[in-house]
Image: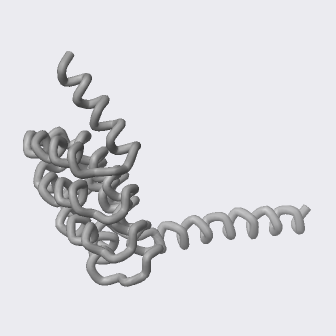
Amino acid sequence: MKRILCIALVIVATGFMARAQEAKTEKTAKEYIADLSSSTDEKTLIEAAQWLGMKKDKDAVPGLINLLKDNREAVRMESAVSLGLIGEESAADALNEALLNDPNAEVRYAALLATMRIGSKKSAEVYLQAKEKDTDPFILDLLAKMEAKAKK
């Protein structure tokens, strides 16, 4: 009986220690925001962008805007997605720029979706420019659907 009690106590104590360790290693919003400007690791940048976007952390907007200029497509795309999730008007100009000029169609598409979510009036003219300039069929299709919906 004592042996079973001891084993049960060890199992319970191990569970508490594991939970305490998990809580200790979880990053704060400030640490994720710091990662946006201090890390060069692609995985770290993407993880920070995703976390901050899910939390809709408005303090992350300047760092995420800066990442729209990163040389890695996945980082730029996650930054655009996160800016859309946060939904701050202050990100509209940078996202409009990405929509018009990013060399990667997936990043442009993410920027388009983000601007749609933000709903900035600044983007209306950019949509017309993108419709004339872009060659990606998915972007052109979404722009055409947006135009048709606006006409109704």
Q: Position of residue 79 (x, y in %)?
A: 32, 62
Nearer to me, 64 or 106: 106
Residue for point 79% across, 62% down: 8
Quadrant containing the C terminus is top left
In the rendered view, tell whether residue 23 sits above or below residue 54: below
Which colour scheme appears in the figure?
Answer: one colour
Residue for point 11% across, 54% down: 90
Q: Position of residue 108 (x, y in %)?
A: 31, 55
Looking at the rendering, which quadrant does residue 51 occupy?
A: bottom left
From where the camera sits, is residue 55 visible?
no
Residue for point 23% across, 62% down: 101
Residue for point 38% across, 68% down: 75
Looking at the rendering, which quadrant does residue 105 occupy?
A: bottom left
Q: Position of residue 104 (x, y in %)?
A: 36, 62
Looking at the rendering, which quadrant does residue 31 occupy?
A: bottom left
In the rendered view, tell whether residue 11 sits above or below residue 135: below
Side of 30 relative to 10 (left or right):
left
Q: Position of residue 112 (x, y in %)?
A: 28, 47
Q: Residue furthest top?
A: 152
From where the camera sits, is residue 102 visible?
yes
Nearer to me, 127 or 16: 127
State the count of labels.
0
Quadrant containing the N terminus is bottom right
